[in-house]
Amino acid sequence: MKNKSVICPGSFDPVTLGHLDIITRASKMFDSVYVAVLINSSKKPCFSIEERMALMREAVEGLSNVEVVRFDGLLAQYCRRHKIDAIVKGLRAVSDFEYEFQMAIANKKLNPQLETIFLTADSDSMYLSSSMVREIGSYGGDIGNFVPACVHDRIVERLRQIHQ
Ligand code: PNS
């Protein structure tokens, strides 16, 4: 599937090893991968957009065909504007499926050229989510197995500040 550009969208609040696994695998399958960090999440992010982008940039530093961008508004419109062929998402469990399936159909209706491709999460990431990282980290628990090593200390520090 070469000569294709894809997008991995998310809040990345913060980036986890599960996200990095999906992005790394996408970077091997496609020409260019945009990691699109949602600016205004309705979930009211813990980490600012600048923090989320900086952490993600550091996490994907070794992947030469990956670019970290910010986006707001509808993903389908962003993809049309930037001539992106497909959305790549990780699926962890059956519980992810209904929501992701609904979004894939809505995005296809909004932009019929746009495909959504699901990669199954790595077995180590099946249970992993940013919210779990935030919760464990904010109570001082060990998040060493959940986030990329290069950004671990900064995530720990930031989560500690939030809980103080
Ligand atoms: O990491 P998240 O919070 O689960 O990511 C969700 C995200 C950013 C992929 C999703 O909320 C999204 O695409 N938001 C942009 C608005 C949009 O296009 N919504 C879909 C219309 S059905």
Image: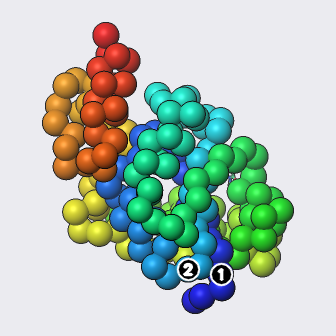
Residue at 36%, 65% (x, y): give it.
Answer: 21
In this orientation, does residue 116 appear?
no
Kindly state the secondary structure of the residue where label 2 is placed.
loop
Residue 61 picture location, percent across and down: 44, 56
Residue at 72%, 44% (x, y): give it.
Answer: 72
Contact (Cβ within 8 Å) of mark 1 with mark 2: yes
Q: Is residue 106 left or right of residue 47?
A: right
Say which of 157 and 90 sits in front.
157
Q: Is residue 102 above or below residue 37?
A: below
Kindly state the secondary structure of the residue where label 1 is placed.
loop
- Farthest residue to the right: give it: 81
In this orientation, does residue 77 appear?
yes
Three-letter amino acid code at the position of disc 2: Phe
Give the quadrant of the C terminus: top left
Three-letter amino acid code at the position of disc 1: Lys
Q: How many marks?
A: 2
Say which of 59 and 14 sits in front.
59
Q: Is residue 64 left or right of residue 15?
A: right
Residue at 45%, 79% (x, y): give it.
Answer: 28
Say which of 110 and 102 sits in front.
110
For residue 47, the mark is none
Q: Is residue 20 left or right of residue 52?
A: left
In the rendered image, which residue does mark 2 sit on? 30
In the rendered image, which residue does mark 1 sit on? 4
Location of residue 5 by image quarter: bottom right
